């Protein structure tokens, strides 16, 4: 699946995607290679870099502290064995966290709860995706027409929220430009250098990119027009002066490699002919950042808490590791990055990996073969839709000894090239793998680091099993997972 022959997603849900306004847009379901590459690079640019990951660590830890206060309001007055629906709380946590990380915006879901507009919006969105992508075309188109209309209305409502996020970014950039009297290019350079600037976030990057691409596209078109009209060759220097600042270079590096007619004819260095992003494209990117970053992380966190309750001895090992490395100073960013980014929590990481082995948040990966291929002696003809069953591979007895045994120990000495690591790939494979995996790992480790030393977790009934359901992602049955939580005395 690492081969570029499998860079496409499953190609049989185009009608559903078109109905939702998502056909050939965004990252997750985009099958237009050029558009997918551009969207993916843009999204990744908003999720990487050491400074960014440090910010993720600090924010996740702060949000985890907020969540801990919801679980155990105060150590003295906490009711022992409080029954808490952890699935619900992690949903709110991950929504707020991605809001602050990616958009510099606290949605306030942890404070308001499930009635929060964004919380309801995300639930509606997943329901709509399920309806249009997993229900047969004939059914949603003709037999469930009323339900389809209702989903479309909810999607339209959510698009308004996305638009407001984009508009707020545009206003911020406009104000910054007029206050500092600088152009987009200089602003983009500032943004790179000044990590603390409140413009250094995903929506601002999207808007800047869009405006920059438009500007260069217009200049190229103007120059091409001049050439067609037989204008003199004095223009190339003007054009390159306008489009070759460092930010332009970065922008070009973000764009695809399609060559414009002018480049073919040697009249232009830049080729941003198809780089323009529509307003809907920007909204789609916002939507995917929210959708990609919420239910996946929150469901896996809920599964992790279930296993902490089910295996108290293993939980104690994780808790002890955390207590041994967590100093009292919470605000020390170096400490935060050390515990959540660097690999200094082997026991905690092994626990997370073992849970995702048995309960992957995304158990099926959908791909499409764009060329003929031979795999293990079998022909995969061009055009084949492929389902990779990660959940099955993770319990394959040929790669995993005692596959049904919950044993974080198995990860202690496993290298990335081991049979075990190859069989378990919760974040996918190759060019289409998950661009949010580092963010997700930091969030999960932060939650464990900030919460586990302060609470003990128990099953509601001894012998409870984790029941999950799968649609777009794997989630606890009925989206609830109730556990008993008590405060641990930490003095
Ligand atoms: C525990 C948390 C997460 C899990 C288990 C997970 C898992 C996955 C998997 C299995 C894929 C498909 C990979 C493939 O086809 O090879 C994927 C794709 C994706 N994920 Fe995640 N993910 C998580 C968190 C996140 C976060 C936090 C974000 C963003 C902030 C994100 C954004 C995306 C996007 C945009 C794609 C589509 C990539 C593409 O098609 O090029 N995910 N994820």
Image (cartoon, rainbow, N blue to C red):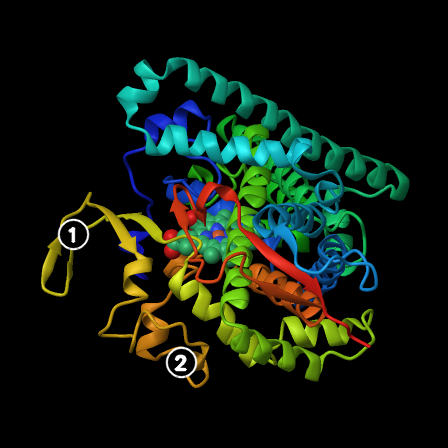
> Residue farthest to the right?
179
Mark number displayed over residue 372 = 1
Residue 67 point in image, percent of width and height: 72, 55
User: In screen coordinates, is 170 left or right of 232?
Assistant: right
Q: Are marks 1 and 2 in contact (CB under 8 Å)?
A: no
32 or 325: nearer the viewer: 325
Residue 96: tell me if it is visible.
Answer: yes
User: In screen coordinates, is 463 left or right of 230?
Assistant: left
274 or 418: nearer the viewer: 418
* Residue drawn 52% across the image and 76% down it: 314
Queried on whether the Cβ of the residue with tag 1 lies below 8 angstroms from ligand 1, the answer reads no
User: In screen coordinates, is 354 left or right of 486?
Assistant: left
Q: Sequence-wise, which precedes: disc 1 or disc 2? A: 1
Name the image quarter holding residue 449: bottom right
Secondary element under disc 2, as helix, strand or loop, is helix
Queried on whether the Cβ of the residue with tag 2 lies below 8 angstroms from ligand 1, the answer reads no
Q: Residues within 10 Å of mark 2 (few under 14, many from 20)?
A: some
Quarter of the figure with the C terminus: bottom right
Residue 268: tell me if it is visible.
Answer: no
* Residue drawn 37% across the image and 61% down it: 429
Q: How many marks?
A: 2
Residue 386 point in image, percent of width and height: 24, 48
Residue at mark 2: 410
* Residue drawn 43% across the image and 33% down it: 129
Q: Nearer the viewer, mark 1 or mark 2?
A: 2
Secondary element under disc 1, as helix, strand or loop, is loop
Q: Residues within 10 Å of mark 1 (few under 14, many from 20)?
A: few
Relative to 87, residue 458 above or below: below
Disc 1 from disc 2: Cα separation: 37 Å
Residue 351 point in image, percent of width and height: 50, 72
Relative to 406, residue 174 above or below: above
Quarter of the figure with the N terminus: bottom left
């Amino acid at each position: 699946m690492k081969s570029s022959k499998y860079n496409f997603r499953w190609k049989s849900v185009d009608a559903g995607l078109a109905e939702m306004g998502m056909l050939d847009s965004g990252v997750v379901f985009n099958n237009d290679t050029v558009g997918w590459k551009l969207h993916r690079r843009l999204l990744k640019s908003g999720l990487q870099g050491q400074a960014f990951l440090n910010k993720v660590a600090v924010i996740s830890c702060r949000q985890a502290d907020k969540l801990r206060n919801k679980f155990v309001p105060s150590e003295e007055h906490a009711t022992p064995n409080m029954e808490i629906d952890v699935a619900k709380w992690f949903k709110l946590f991950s929504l707020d966290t991605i809001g602050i990380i990616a958009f510099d915006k606290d949605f306030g879901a942890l404070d308001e709860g499930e009635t929060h507009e964004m919380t309801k919006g995300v639930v509606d969105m997943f329901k709509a995706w399920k309806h249009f992508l997993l229900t047969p075309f004939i059914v949603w188109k003709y037999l469930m027409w009323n339900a389809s209309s209702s989903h479309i209305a909810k999607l339209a409502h959510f698009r308004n929220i996305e638009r407001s996020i984009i508009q707020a970014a545009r206003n911020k950039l406009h104000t910054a430009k007029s206050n500092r009297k600088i152009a987009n290019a200089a602003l983009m350079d500032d943004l790179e250098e000044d990590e603390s600037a409140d413009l250094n976030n995903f929506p601002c990057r999207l808007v800047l990119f869009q405006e920059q691409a438009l500007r260069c596209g217009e200049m190229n078109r103007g120059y091409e027009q001049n050439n067609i009209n037989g204008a003199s060759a004095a223009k190339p220097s003007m054009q390159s002066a306008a489009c070759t600042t460092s930010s332009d270079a970065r922008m070009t590096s973000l764009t695809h490699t399609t060559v414009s007619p002018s480049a073919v004819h040697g009249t232009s260095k830049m080729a941003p002919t198809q780089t323009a992003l529509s307003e809907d494209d920007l909204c789609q990117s916002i939507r995917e950042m929210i959708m990609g970053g919420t239910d996946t992380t929150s469901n896996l966190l809920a599964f992790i808490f279930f296993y902490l309750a089910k295996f108290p001895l293993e939980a104690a090992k994780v808790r002890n590791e955390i207590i041994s490395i967590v100093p009292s100073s919470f605000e020390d960013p170096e400490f935060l990055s050390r515990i959540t980014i660097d690999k200094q929590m082997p026991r905690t990481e092994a626990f997370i990996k073992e849970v995702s082995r048995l309960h992957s948040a995304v158990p099926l990966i959908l791909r499409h073969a764009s060329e003929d291929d031979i795999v293990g002696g079998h022909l995969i003809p061009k055009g084949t839709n492929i389902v990779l069953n990660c959940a099955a591979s993770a319990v394959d007895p040929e790669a995993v000894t005692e596959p049904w045994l919950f044993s974080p120990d198995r990860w202690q000495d496993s290298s990335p090239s081991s049979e075990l690591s190859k069989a378990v790939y919760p974040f996918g494979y190759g060019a289409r793998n998950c661009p949010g995996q580092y963010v997700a790992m930091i969030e999960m480790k932060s939650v464990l680091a900030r919460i586990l030393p302060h609470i003990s977790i128990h099953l509601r009934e001894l012998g409870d099993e984790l029941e999950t359901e799968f649609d777009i992602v794997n989630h606890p049955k009925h989206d609830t997972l109730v556990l008993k939580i008590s405060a641990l005395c930490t003095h």
